[in-house]
């Protein structure tokens, strides 16, 4: 590699400046689908972090032996294997959440963030930076997931992690949970708000 | 006198004056009170030689019959439901006025507040689109909608539908209808069903408390039909008397505040058409579309979809169809712009409105969703119409040049 890879920036950049969801706009599908409640959002985030970090490491280890022609297939096999492991673990230890996430754990395979990072980073870097890159991008993705899940559950169900947060006196005074927050369109609008805030804070990300 | 005062105040608001920070507020007030020296320079309103504020005021005038009748109907339904036998006109009007006043005030305060804030922040002139939107929102919502919900929904749609797209004249969707849709999807229990459409509590000693008798609901006619079993249904009002088409035409039925009276909507339509503000093409084609689809639905009426037993004419009389045709579909910002496009747009609004209300029992009122859907498609329709024109002219030109040579 000609340019020096700075481990710290590899880890920290995806948090905000190069966030996979709000800057690169990848993985939106799962953001819409799993964030109606906070708990599945957190579990989904952890799953993606794990899969992304380990697939990055594995691909990075065998990067020099993969024939270029079939690299996508090799990447898919690695990711699919890891996703199945995660799926089985969730079914064993967190059955309820796994049922809520249903097909979306399996669909981590098709998450653009994974293929993007494998192609763009793991194929050309050593295992340790690749691991950090996976962790960083996974966390960047999870941050957005958790923020969106937080607002959607708070405003849509009045709860956080299943515990009621909005006091009963509010309901007696006529407050009603917003049913629209449960529906996927609001996830898109919350993501848009996050992008808005982030662009307003980082002028260099603004496009014309 | 007022004009003199305004003129004297003006220098303070010009750039360099000490109150320059509030120039857009001042400008908004001045042009609201007096015809401005400048006409619109940007946005869609450039189609008119009129200042868009004048246009808005005429639309508000056209809405006045609906507003006044809405007041009367609200008071009337309340008295009817609470078992009164006499219906004194002025106390009915007073009750309706008191019922709607807080809602109008709240929508204007919230909506205009956001508009003023954004205009100040961007240093632009205050945009006047909210004058109409602010009166439309209370008119298309059930009278029992909690006021804070109106405020939340208004704020949401003014920010996300209008301001983020660049303000009045740039919005893709009709702001008032989005407010209604946000309420409808966000708070379904408060926005539809049995108890939303009739004011139940006395206000300042006027009116009575409505009690719902067993088996009698205060749902709108369309709501009642959607939950009816099979083809034989009788639409009844709050005390169980059947509702005739004539009642529906006059508007003495439960429904959202301003949309019940087809008669008053026709008056409004006449004002809009006479002054040339709304497009007759859209209005007419919405009605044709509704009649057409109503006819098809009625021809193939099945007990699975009770609303298909409504005659085409009834489809126009009940619910918000007429209101949507006259005031919503014709919104110049969100409708199609080309001549042929207007026909297609209007026709599809009418057809889709009837399809939704007939074949989806979950949504007894389809006019709102139909207009929003066609709002999204209007630019595409315009694009197709323009492209067809261009290619036809190209062909004509080609044929001509070939003939000549």
Image (cartoon, coloured by chain):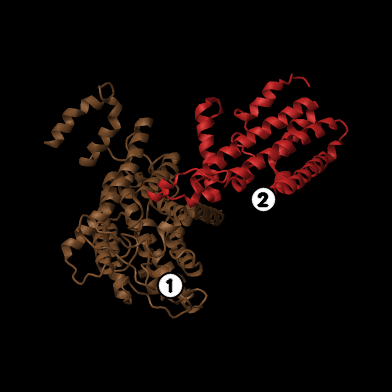
Q: Position of residue A197 (x, y in %)?
A: 50, 32
Q: Is residue B237 left or right of residue B344?
A: left
Work out whether B306 lies above or below A120.
below
Q: Which chain is red?
A: A
Chain B: what color? brown
Give the mark toward the camera: 2 or 1: 2
Farthest front residue in view: A168
Q: Is residue B39 left or right of residue B392?
A: left
Gap between marks 2 and 1 measured at Cα: 40 Å
Q: Nearer the viewer, residue B189 or B336?
A: B189
Q: Residue placed at 27% from the left, 49% from the top?
A: B102
Residue wearing tag 1: B225
Farthest left residue in view: B1
Q: Is any part of residue B153 visible from this angle?
A: yes
Q: Position of residue A163 (x, y in %)?
A: 54, 45
Q: Position of residue A198 (x, y in %)?
A: 53, 31
Residue B207 placement: quadrant: bottom left
Residue wearing tag 2: A96
Say few, some or many: other residues with alpha carbon within 10 Å of mark 2 (under 14 / 14 to 19 / 20 or more): few
Say few, some or many: other residues with alpha carbon within 10 Å of mark 1 (under 14 / 14 to 19 / 20 or more): many
């Amino acid at each position: 590699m000609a340019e020096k890879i700075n481990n710290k920036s590899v880890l920290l950049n995806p948090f905000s400046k190069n966030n996979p969801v709000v800057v690169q706009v990848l993985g939106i599908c799962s953001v819409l689908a799993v964030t109606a409640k906070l708990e599945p959002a957190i579990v989904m985030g952890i799953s993606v972090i794990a899969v992304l970090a380990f697939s990055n490491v594995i691909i990075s280890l065998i990067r020099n032996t993969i024939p270029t022609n079939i690299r996508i297939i090799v990447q898919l096999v690695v990711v699919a294997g890891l996703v199945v492991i995660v799926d089985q673990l969730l079914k064993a230890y967190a059955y309820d959440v796994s049922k809520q996430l249903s097909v979306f754990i399996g669909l981590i395979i098709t998450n653009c963030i994974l293929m993007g990072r494998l192609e763009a980073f793991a194929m050309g870097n050593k295992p340790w930076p690749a691991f950090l890159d996976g962790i960083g991008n996974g966390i960047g993705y999870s941050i957005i997931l958790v923020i969106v899940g937080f607002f959607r559950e708070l405003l849509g169900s009045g709860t956080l992690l299943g515990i009621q947060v909005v006091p009963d006196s509010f309901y007696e005074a006529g407050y009603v949970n917003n049913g629209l927050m449960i529906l996927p369109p609001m996830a898109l609008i919350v993501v848009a708000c996050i992008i808005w805030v982030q662009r307003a804070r980082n002028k260099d990300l603004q496009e014309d | 006198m007022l004009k003199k005062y305004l003129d004297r105040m003006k220098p303070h608001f010009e750039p360099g004056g000490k109150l320059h920070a509030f120039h857009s507020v001042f400008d908004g007030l001045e042009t609201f009170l007096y015809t401005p020296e400048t006409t619109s320079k940007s946005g869609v309103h450039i189609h008119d030689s009129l200042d868009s504020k004048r246009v808005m005021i005429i639309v508000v005038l056209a809405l006045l019959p609906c507003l006044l009748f809405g007041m009367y109907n609200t008071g009337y339904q309340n008295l009817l439901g609470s078992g009164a036998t006499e219906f004194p006109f002025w106390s009915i009007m007073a009750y309706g006025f008191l019922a709607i006043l807080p809602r109008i005030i709240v929508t204007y305060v919230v909506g205009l507040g956001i508009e003023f804030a954004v205009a100040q922040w961007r240093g632009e002139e205050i945009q006047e689109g909210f004058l109409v939107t602010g009166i439309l929102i209370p008119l298309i919502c059930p009278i029992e909608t909690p006021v804070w919900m109106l405020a939340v929904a208004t704020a949401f749609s003014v920010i996300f539908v209008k301001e983020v797209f660049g303000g009045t004249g740039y919005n893709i969707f009709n702001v008032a209808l989005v407010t209604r849709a946000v309420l409808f999807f966000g708070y379904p229990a408060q926005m539809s069903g049995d108890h939303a459409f009739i004011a139940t509590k006395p206000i300042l000693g006027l009116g009575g408390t409505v009690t719902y008798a067993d088996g009698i609901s205060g749902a709108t006619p369309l709501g009642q039909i959607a939950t009816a079993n099979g083809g034989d249904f009788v639409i009844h009002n709050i005390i169980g008397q059947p509702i005739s088409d004539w009642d529906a035409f006059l508007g003495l039925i439960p429904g959202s505040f301003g949309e019940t009276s087809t008669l008053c909507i026709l008056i409004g339509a006449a004002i809009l058409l006479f002054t040339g503000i709304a497009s007759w093409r859209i209005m007419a084609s919405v009605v044709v579309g509704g009649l057409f689809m109503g006819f098809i639905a009625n021809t193939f009426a099945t007990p699975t979809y009770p609303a298909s037993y409504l005659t085409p004419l009834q489809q126009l009389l009940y619910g918000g169809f007429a209101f949507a045709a006259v005031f919503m579909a014709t919104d110049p910002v969100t409708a199609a712009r080309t001549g042929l496009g207007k026909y297609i747009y209007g026709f599809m609004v009418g057809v889709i409105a009837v399809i939704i209300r007939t074949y989806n029992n979950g949504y007894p009122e389809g006019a709102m969703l139909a207009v929003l859907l066609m709002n999204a498609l209007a630019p595409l329709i315009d694009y197709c119409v323009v492209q067809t024109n261009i290619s036809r002219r190209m062909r004509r030109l080609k044929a001509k040049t070939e003939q000549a040579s």
